[in-house]
């Protein structure tokens, strides 16, 4: 005999359905509450903001250091190569007449010579003046040409050809001049001639206000009478401008540019 279960009540099924729906809603609500992050108090918010600020400042500082140590040198190297190339091209195209006197004055920022320090593998144009924006920050070496610090030129029969250059960043042409020792050669090429100097002495540190180091007979150099001298000046210690480092030399040779470079530039 087959038996049948009594049919379920319609109201019972509806109640169970409503109960299931309510349970699902409560479960979804609990899930949403668990996913919502805790906002925290004012101290937490300020800590997060401070952390983000320090991270941003750190990135900015890294970018600035990279710009100073790498990018300024890259820009300076391009300027140095372009300026030296232009000078050599102009001199070769329009050499000075044999009886023409050397040019004694140039416009501020104008390149007029090339400085070589063979021991340090330095080849850098020399421009008139020591303005940072127009000369030094472009990677060039600047000639002290403004009063009251005006100094001599290589062609002068007597005088001190005084130059300034960066030790760090912007091409850093004078970074290693502290490695020069007496007897090392320094050569200056102009449109007319090559002038060879021999390094004689250096001053490791002196205040920036000590302008006596670039006088016609520079104080502290060991020179006691007028002559034909060269002075290189740069900042020290490295990456600061607190003091100045000075290197002096005495001219030992001069030859017309038409005769070719001196042996000091041709030797390996």
Image (cartoon, grey):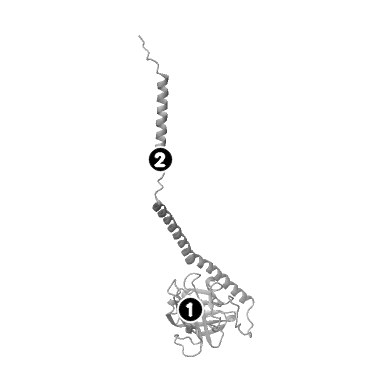
x, y percent for residue 153:
55, 83
Front in this rendered view, residue 266 or 97: 97
Q: Are circles 1 and 2 on residues that touch, CB within 8 Å?
A: no
Front in this rendered view, residue 136 or 15: 15
- Element assignment for label 2: helix
Q: Taking the image as drawn, is residue 137 in sight?
A: yes
Please give the label number shown on residue 95. Answer: none
The mark nearer the N terminus, 1 or 2, is 2
Residue drawn at point x = 53 percent, y = 67 percent: 75
- Element assignment for label 1: strand
x, y percent for residue 261:
55, 79
Q: Residue furthest top?
A: 1
Front in this rendered view, residue 124 or 241: 241
* Residue 189 placement: quadrant: bottom right
Height in image: 64 above or below 207? Answer: above
Height in image: 63 above or below 209? Answer: above
Height in image: 105 above or below 20? Answer: below
x, y percent for residue 215:
50, 85
x, y percent for residue 97:
64, 82
Marks 1 and 2, how far apart in space? 71 Å
Residue drawn at point x = 48 percent, y = 83 percent: 211
Residue highlighted by disc 1:
233
Q: Residue furthest left?
A: 1
Residue highlighted by disc 2:
33
- Nearer the camera: disc 1 or disc 2: 2
């Amino acid at each position: 005999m087959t038996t049948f279960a009594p049919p379920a009540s319609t109201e019972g099924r509806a109640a169970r359905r409503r109960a299931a729906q309510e349970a699902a809603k409560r479960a979804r609500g609990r899930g949403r509450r668990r996913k919502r992050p805790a906002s925290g108090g004012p101290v937490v918010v300020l800590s997060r903001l401070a952390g983000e600020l320090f991270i941003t400042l750190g990135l900015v500082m890294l970018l600035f250091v990279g710009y100073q140590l790498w990018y300024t040198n890259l820009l300076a190297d391009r300027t140095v190569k372009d300026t030296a190339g232009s000078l050599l091209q102009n001199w070769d195209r329009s050499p000075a007449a044999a009886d023409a006197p050397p040019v004694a004055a140039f416009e501020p920022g104008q390149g007029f010579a090339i400085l070589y320090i063979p021991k340090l593998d330095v080849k850098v144009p020399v421009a008139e003046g020591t303005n940072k924006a127009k000369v030094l920050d472009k990677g060039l070496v600047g000639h002290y040409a403004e009063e009251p610090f005006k100094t001599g030129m290589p062609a002068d029969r007597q005088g001190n050809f005084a130059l300034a250059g960066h030790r760090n960043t912007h091409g850093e042409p004078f970074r290693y001049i502290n490695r020069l020792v007496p007897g090392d050669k320094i050569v200056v090429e102009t449109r007319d001639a090559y002038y060879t100097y021999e390094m004689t002495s250096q001053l490791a540190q002196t205040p920036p206000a000590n302008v006596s180091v670039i006088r016609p007979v520079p104080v502290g150099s060991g020179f006691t009478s007028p002559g034909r001298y060269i002075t290189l000046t740069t900042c020290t210690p490295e990456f600061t401008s607190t003091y100045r480092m000075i290197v002096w030399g005495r001219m030992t040779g001069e030859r017309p540019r038409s005769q070719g470079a001196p042996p000091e530039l041709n030797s390996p």
